[in-house]
Image (spheres, rainbow, N blue to C red):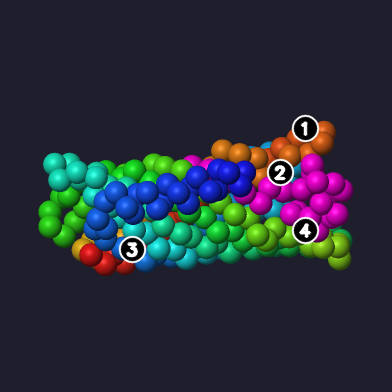
Amino acid sequence: MKKIFALAVAAVLSVSAAWAQDYTRLQASYVSHFMTNSAVAGKDIEPKGVTLGAVLGFSVTDELPIFVESGANLTWAHGAMDVPNGEVKSTYMNFAIPVNGVYKFEINDKVAISGFAGLNFKVNFLAKTKAYGTKTNWLSKDDMGGRDNRANIFQLGCQFGAGVHLGQVYLGYEFQPDLMNFQKFEGGKAHKWMANYITVGFTIE
């Protein structure tokens, strides 16, 4: 996992060195998470929250509107659900480095539509649940009953989506599934995060 994350950082740096930067976008997203295996984690753990990020765009060729985008995102999400005799609360935070290939179709000099797909390299640094007065840290081997049961700190994922560019304003949608397990138990059960993002951004050229 650490080698994959190191390669991700190297990829971002190599992109920066290879092309001149064309634009910067500052953005914020509403994010809604859910898990792939409801047998491991049900609807009581579906945190929703916000992502703050910055994107650097690099033109690949002068002939076609193809770009490479790299950046950094910080996500905070929280969920709460009433259950019999109590409440379940969950809090989740991560830092991610996305790298996307983008095709941008310009309708006129003020309006454009873009589609993108790529990979993200994620660091999970907070994943906690509180239920029936007991707090559980998913990243702790002590709380999860061993190193093999705890959640992964480093993950590889992907994303794809589309955006509308209205002058300097950006409106976008993104779907982001994990490619690597967030958590796998000794018994073989595993689950991954999947997330929907609705984004508003401001582009600086």
Task: State the residue position of label 4.
Answer: 137
Residue 83 image position (x, y, % from top left): 79, 57
Q: CA distance from mark 1 to mark 3?
A: 41 Å
Neighbor class of circle 3 (other Cα within 10 Å; few <14, some 14-19, many 20+) is: many
Q: Secondary structure at mark 4?
A: strand
In the image, taking residue 180 as reference, residue 42 lies left or right, namely: right
> Counting residues from the N terminus, which is met first, the one under dot 2 or under dot 1?
2
Q: Mark 2 is on which residue type? A: Gln
Task: State the residue position of label 2.
Answer: 183
Q: Residue at the spot x=41%, y=57% of the render?
A: 71
Position of the N terminus by quadrant: top right
Q: Residue at the spot x=65%, y=59% of the render?
A: 125
Q: Residue furthest top?
A: 188
Q: Mark 1 is on which residue type? A: Gly
Q: Mark 4 is on which residue type? A: Asn
Please report the bounds of the magenta region as a residue range: 136-158
Residue 6 image position (x, y, % from top left): 53, 48
Q: Is residue 19 visible?
A: yes
Residue 137 covered by magenta stretch: yes
Q: Secondary structure at mark 1?
A: loop
Q: Secondary structure at mark 3?
A: strand
Task: State the residue position of label 1.
Answer: 188
Residue 58 image position (x, y, % from top left): 28, 52
